[in-house]
Image (spheres, helix red, strand yellow):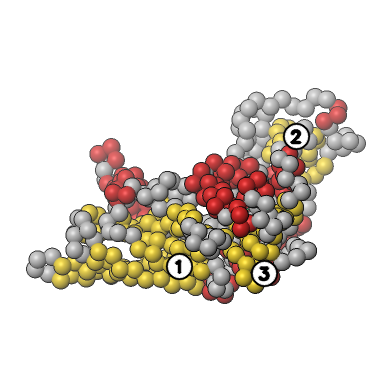
Amino acid sequence: MFNLIFPGNQTADESKRQPPDTQAEREDDGSPEEYVARSGFTGRGSDQISFSSGDKLLVHAKPSSEWWWAELRGVIGYVPAGYLSQDAAEEEEEEEEEEEDPWQDDEYFGSYSTLRLHLEMLSDKSRTEAYRQVILSNCASLRNKVVMDLGCGTGIISLFCAQLAQPSVVYAVEASSMAEYTRQLVKQNGCEEVVTVLQGRAEEIELPEQVDVLVSEWMGNCLLFEFMVESVLLARDRWLKEGGVIWPSSAALTLVPCQADSYYAEKMAFWERPYGLDFTPLQPLAQQEFFTKPKFSHLIEPNDCLTAPCDVLNLDMYTLQVQDLEEIKGQFHFCVDKPGVFHGFTAWFTVHFESLETGGATVELNTGPNSEPTHWKQTLFMLDRPVSVYAGDSISGTIVLRRNPVWRRHMTVTLHWNINSCTEDTDNCQVGTKSFPMWR
Ligand code: 6LC
């Protein structure tokens, strides 16, 4: 979902722009201001001008926040405001500061202050219904309880609590500026007596009391990416009452060796003979470009699983410690049950919500190929070279999730595997290892 490496595309809106013609749109005192280009830009059409990094431009008017009317060496036209800065030194300093935040919070919470990701999460029925089901099936036990909803976003879980159960209070904590809207949504739905929205990082906010229930939807790609789980653990240690409940209560990461024929064909086999030509010298480049990082929006067909899946990690949300997140190791042993091409491993997660009622059923949110697809989809880790495998072969090995020591929301997944094939006349063993940065 949230993507901390790919910056938003700075594409210029290609619609025809007219120069500003009203005095009101011009700078107040009419005198142009000098700006420096932070990077080069190639103007399109007749009304945009091109410039190089470091060029000094005179800005005559700012008709919109995105496009300014500027002059360079006597040529006048539109320029994208985002490429200019008034004080190069100041700008550099700011950039350095931003880059130094190992949590990239401006970017992270910035992305949650617009609707795109909230729409994606709320449209995910399996996810949202799972939380609704948890509240519904525990409504009796939630009566008069104090609840904290960590990273409430638009407040959906808090609103479910207020609507379906009778907690005494729900503290809905949200760091992004979406919190301002969440407050309105709480009011609009008549829940302001129960739900209190607190804007701030869960690590920094103060609550008037400890809580009975800590609920959060913190799971990222491959379960841990984003490391929002750290915020949950810190809140647990600070705000959860002795004997209180955490939802989800446990989380598991599951792995399966798989075929990925069409992805392999699209990105790698393609170069074998496009238009009757041999483009194979590009294959090492293709491997580097497409298979170095995991493909995080993969939807694996159950048929592409070469073996039964296996849980490689199990996290207990009551005992897990922040320092445990630095390096998490798991093991796997798979038995190939049909012949096929082993292209890589696919991973997904499942979380469990324990019941507050004695003998009550556990609710599960499973993001695997045998459940309804979720917005997380699955994560595909491609091997550098496909390997043919046969029924009876075994694939065993280890997985290590190593948190980036600098960029705290990122991690590297290292897979190490042995393929033992027991064909009629040979006992053959192949070994492989590969590390996948997600994303730094
Ligand atoms: C959930 C992310 C939401 O939780 C999103 O609205 C974000 O702004 C908020 N959030 C994340 N960390 C914190 C924190 N430490 N304190 C307060 N709010 C937080 C969906 N993301 C995933 N499930 N991956």
Q: Is residue 34 above or below residue 219?
A: above
Mark 3 highlights which residue?
A: 241
Displayed quadrant of residue 97: bottom right
Residue 358: give its label: none
Image position of 310 (left or right of 139): left
Residue 130 vertical placement versus 326 (above, below): above
Mark 3 surroundings: few (<14), some (14-19) or many (≥20) residues within 10 A: some
Badge 1 marks a residue whose secondary structure is strand
Residue closest to the far right: 29
Is residue 276 at least partly visible in the picture?
Answer: yes
The residue type indicated by label 2 comes to Ser
Would you say the residues marked 3 and 1 are in contact, meaning their CB atoms lie under 8 Å apart? no
Q: Residues within 10 Å of mark 1 (few under 14, many from 20)?
A: some
Amino acid type, mark 3: Lys
In the rendered view, does 430 fall on the left or right side of 4?
A: left
Q: CA distance from mark 3 to mark 1?
A: 24 Å
- How packed mark 2 is, by other alpha carbons closer than 10 Å (few <14, some 14-19, many 20 or more), is few
